[in-house]
Image (cartoon, rainbow, N blue to C red):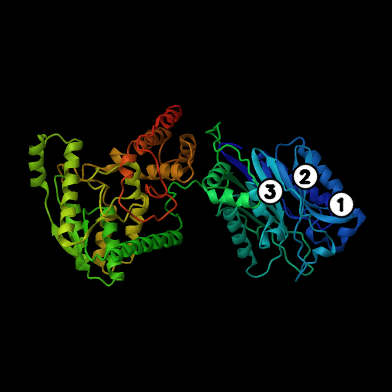
Amino acid sequence: MTNGFIRIAAATPSVKVADTESNVASILEIAGDLDSKGVEIAVFPELCVTGYTCADLFHNATLLRKAKEGVDRIVAWSSSHGIHLVIGAPVAMDGSIANCGIFVHDGNMDLVVKSYLPNYNEFYERRWFAPAPESQTAVFESHGAKIGIEICEDLWVPAPPSSSLALQGAEIIFNLSASDDTIGKYSYTRNLVIQQSARCISAYAYSSAGIGESSTDLVFSPKAFIAENGTLLQANNRWDADCKHIIADVDIEALRRDRFHNTSYAECARRNGFSQTQASLTSCDFDMSYSLTGRKTDPRPFVPADDAMRDERCTEIVNIQTSALATRLSAIHCSKLVVGISGGLDSTLALLVAVRTFDSLKLDRKGIIGVTMPGFGTTDRTYDNAIALMRQLYVTIREVPIAAAVTQHFADIQHDPAVHDVTYENCQARERTQIIMDIANAEGGIVLGTGDLSELALGWATYNGDHMSMYGINSGVPKTLVRYLVDWFAVRADTPELKSTLKDIIATPISPELIPADEQGNIKQKTEDLVGPYDLHDFFLYYTLRFGFSPTKIYYLAKTAFAGTFDSGTILKWLRVFFRRFFAQQFKRSCLPDGPKVGSVCLSPRGDWRMPSDASSAIWLSEIDNLKP
């Protein structure tokens, strides 16, 4: 195991039915190749030493003897190689023949007998084999991880052995299979593997027999899948005869964290009579040169790369936001909303959701009061977009310039307006919040907050300014996803004019616009120049909250994900900023308004994230300071 990852493979060698010497040679050839690639554990198909389709030959003494010799040869080979293997062979035991998965490691072997023998339709396994005793143990140690073994049909029953193996601590399940091909069976099997990995909070490697198996009545294509906690990491091209294996690095540290975090998992183990002794959550020794195989570290973990999946994700989020706001308005018998409209992404998304909600409730859109509040840093571009957006959505438009009121406030508190410091900025944010709060009071409505999840993580909001509202509709949406949600609305815009406005808002640099524009009237204060790239911060946020990873591991993953985009020095710089701000700004999150959770990462103090506001960041920052660019 390296950096919390363990490299595994699912191999699909060609077989010659009943030719054990040829099959063993093929297994060892692939095993040697996988060993040279750093693979630590590999699974091969069911009965791969003999072939699955030997039929009545399984009761032939010569085949059984040669199968044993073949297994012994593989075991002897393993004594001088680091890779561990899971292979399949028939084994004579206790007066019967067993269909076995054999865990081969360091010159030793352990046997697991198939539990469920299909004896229906095209299958006649009970003609040749005896099932496993109920008391068998199938959890083993390998390269710092716990592994479990089940065989083909075992996965298809209502209570698969892998569920029990996972509750006993198995972190990776290996399945040796021989599944013939019928219409629809491939996708069903793939989904079964993915779902079982999710249910067991485990990795799951599946290898099925293929090329060379008898085609007397059936066709076998080699199928290989590696899944991790509900995500398919690798799958082979089953019709490609040259594809002999797939390889993936599975994140054992992430699996362990999820099992610790999911208290129902441990309770389920207890109720089923199992007591787990799990390894440490952390991996102490890091090799920054270690390159991940078979898995992609997505630089935008909140944003699906696939267009169809991204559209589906955006649809789901918009529906969640709309339902949440509709429920809140109905519960408090409110038909008026006040939204501060800046011409930026966050307020645009909030307004679009508000309009969709009012339409769903059959409320007049004029009950949505959009308030634009131009100040010292407002540019023509954002002002024009704010006005155009409200006009094109047919909401009530209010314009309240804040310059005069803020200038008076500067005089009241004796602040020099030429000094563009935090006071200069926050006075504007609090003035705007006061305006929309008071309008909401006067109209009998509520203020809809616009701040997003990323801003909450970094504390990039003025306390009791834009930090505050009566319902925070975007509080569960990270900044990297906001842009795509606005684009989702743009694609579905009723008019070309609305689509054009939304597209220009998407293209506008992110800015609080609290500092005067430059000489050409362009935005001078760009958020990402000040606080750092949101692509990086959302990446850091995801792996900090979703898996509880250390700064070292997050840095390692970020170097992989952002190779060619950000150099290691830049990543380290903003990683330190992230952890410093994340700890220092918890006090703002401790008093957040209500808002809907939309994904696996949430910062609500009433829900997913409860942290003392005065917690020290020292050990995290110290770890970052010890990292090398």
Q: Is residue 254 left or right of residue 13?
A: left
Is residue 446 left or right of 1 when viewed as pictured? Answer: left
Residue 476: x and y in percent read 37, 52
Residue 485 in the image, given as x and y percentages of width and height = 35, 58
Extreme-right residue of the structure = 61
Q: CA distance from mark 1 to mark 3?
A: 21 Å
State the quadrant of the C terminus. Answer: top left
Q: Residue at 17% of width from left, 36% of height from top?
A: 420
- The percent position of residue 468, horizontal first and vertical second, equals 25, 49
> Which amino acid, by three-letter code, is at mark 2?
Asp
Pointers 2 and 1 in contact (CB under 8 A)? Answer: no
Q: Which residue is mark 3?
A: 148
Q: Which residue is mark 2?
A: 110
- Please report whichever mark, 2 or 1, sits nearer to the chain's N-terminal start: 1
Q: Quadrant of residue 626?
A: top left
The answer to whether residue 577 of the structure is visible from this angle is yes
Number of on-image labels: 3
Q: CA distance from mark 3 to mark 2?
A: 11 Å
The tag earlier along the polypeptide, 3 or 2, is 2
Q: Nearer the viewer, residue 119 or 231?
A: 119
In the visual, does 272 lie left or right of 588? right
Kindly identify the amino acid type of the residue bearing the numbered disc 1: Met
The residue shown at (11%, 36%) is 413
| Callout 2 secondary element | strand
Mark linked to residue 93: 1
Task: Give the image quarter of residue 127.
Answer: bottom right
- Percent coordinates x, y for residue 13 in the rendering: 73, 52
SS for dot 3: strand
Q: Is residue 483 above or below residue 285?
A: below
Is the N terminus in the top left, top right, bottom left or bottom right quadrant? top right
